[in-house]
Amino acid sequence: MAENIKVAKGLAGVITDETSVSKVMAETNSLTYRGYAVQDLCEKCSWEEVAFLMVNKELPSSNELADFIKTEKEYRNISKDLLDVIHKFPKGSHPMDTLRTGVSYLGMEDERIWNNSAVVNMDKYIRMLAKIPTIIAAAYRHKKGKAFIDPSNELTASENFFHMCFGKIPAKEVIKAFDVSLILYAEHSFNASTFATRVITSTTSDIYSAVCGGIGALKGPLHGGANEQVMHMLKEIGEVKNAKKWILNALVNKKKVMGFGHRVYKSGDSRVPTMTKYAEKIALFTGGEKWIQISNILRDTMIKEKNIYPNLDFPAGPAYYMMGFDIEMFTPIFVMSRITGWTAHIMEQAADNRIIRPLSAYVGSPQREVLSIEERKP
Ligand code: COA
């Protein structure tokens, strides 16, 4: 330990900058995007309206929304070259790795890569918003040995994603639940992946590099990867009758229970009630009620025994599973949404930039002499 230096491990409690993108209010378990309560956005807005809001700072007028959707639809296709590259990836690769490489490829295809102006970054944003779902669906079909399905310009973003993955569109209730999950996942202030995108942007690197960094950070199970781990855990428990014993055993063994806990929220995550409500609706459609029942036992026991509450990944994981997605698709879906928040932060950082460069407390060897190789210990 360095003497007389207070280290903020994990940057806990450190305010590193100002932001106008979102406000996380742990005291009231609430969250606003650009001043709007996230629950209101879920009930009153489409995913596309929120995707516009995040980066443009205001909700769109009907003309602005129509233009935004038109551009997004025009960008949905990916190049034949990128599709060929995806088809060369090892079938065992995780779609987050495919996506990280795919977004990197999008950057290489963009001649404007070094143009970081706000206008060009706005266009690059819509390009990524439109193409990321296509890359994920292409990776999914490739792994299944199935042919790529072209995106459709007739469909909303969410409908189009189901179409590209499964060749069909589910009931409107499922689409609404998927839209809601995207809205809830869109943004959450200085979380690890967003901070990674801001660090990369602060060096005046390009937006594609920043997003690749964000994808790398989001993949980790302590962050976005938790939604996949939640479903692995629920499947391991398997049946309602096993749930109580499983969770008590996990706590005795000091196991980290995925989908629980949060750096900022200590008495409940603002997004959980809305996602839980929609997960319960999906369960009625799919007959997946047992996942809800197991989840309820885990939640009640964690709160009673540890006073630790579920985070958004806890209801989102089973919701995606009940919608028919393979578990490894969950975190890539998170990226489809978080590209909005990342871009809002990337543009905010670029507009008022100072390179992010914290200090460290050195605890290594004192300064010493370099010995010749003969003088060193054998
Ligand atoms: N299961 C069991 N115990 C947990 C827990 C969990 N999911 N999350 C936190 N705790 C415990 C810690 O062990 C610690 O206990 P201690 O004080 O006895 O050591 C205490 O709660 C505080 O947790 P801490 O690790 O300091 O919180 P953090 O702010 O550093 O980490 C997370 C936050 C989200 C990384 C952490 O809660 C976690 O790993 N959760 C599981 C992964 C997850 O769901 N991630 C998605 C986040 S949205």
Image: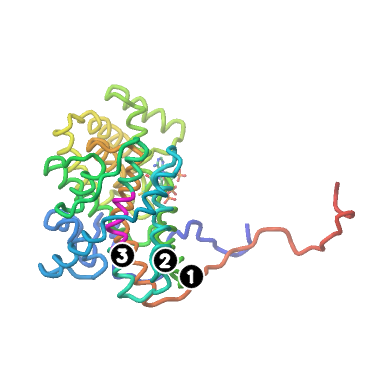
User: Which corner quadrant holds the N terminus?
Assistant: bottom right
Q: Secondary structure at mark 2?
A: helix
Asked if the magenta segment contains residue 131, the reply would be yes
Label 2 to label 3: alpha-carbon separation:
15 Å
Number of residues whose C-alpha sits closer than 10 Å to that of mark 2, classed few (under 14), some (14–19) or many (20 or more): many
| Closer to the camera in the image, 104 or 351 | 104
Number of residues whose C-alpha sits closer than 10 Å to that of mark 3, classed few (under 14), some (14–19) or many (20 or more): many
Identified at 20% across, 49% down, the residue is: 160
Q: Are marks 2 and 1 in contact (CB under 8 Å)?
A: yes
Asked if the magenta segment contains residue 133, the reply would be yes
Which residue has dot 1 on it?
356
* Rendered location of residue 317, percent (x, y): 29, 40
* Rendered location of residue 150, percent (x, y): 25, 48
Which residue has dot 3 on it?
125
Amino acid, disc 1? Ile
Badge 2 or badge 3: first in the primary sequence: 3
**Mark identifier at residue 15:** none
Q: Secondary structure at mark 3?
A: helix
Amino acid, disc 2? Arg
Range of the magenta residues?
A: 127-135
* Rendered location of residue 253, percent (x, y): 46, 31
Does residue 307 appear in the picture of this structure?
no
Which residue has dot 2 on it?
198
Assess mark 2: CB under 8 A from ligand 1? no
Does residue 123 appear in the picture of this structure?
yes
Please tell me whether mark 2 or mark 3 is closer to you in this view: 3
Assess mark 3: CB under 8 A from ligand 1? no
Amino acid, disc 3? Tyr
Q: Quadrant of ligand 1?
A: top left
Identified at 15% across, 52% down, the residue is: 155
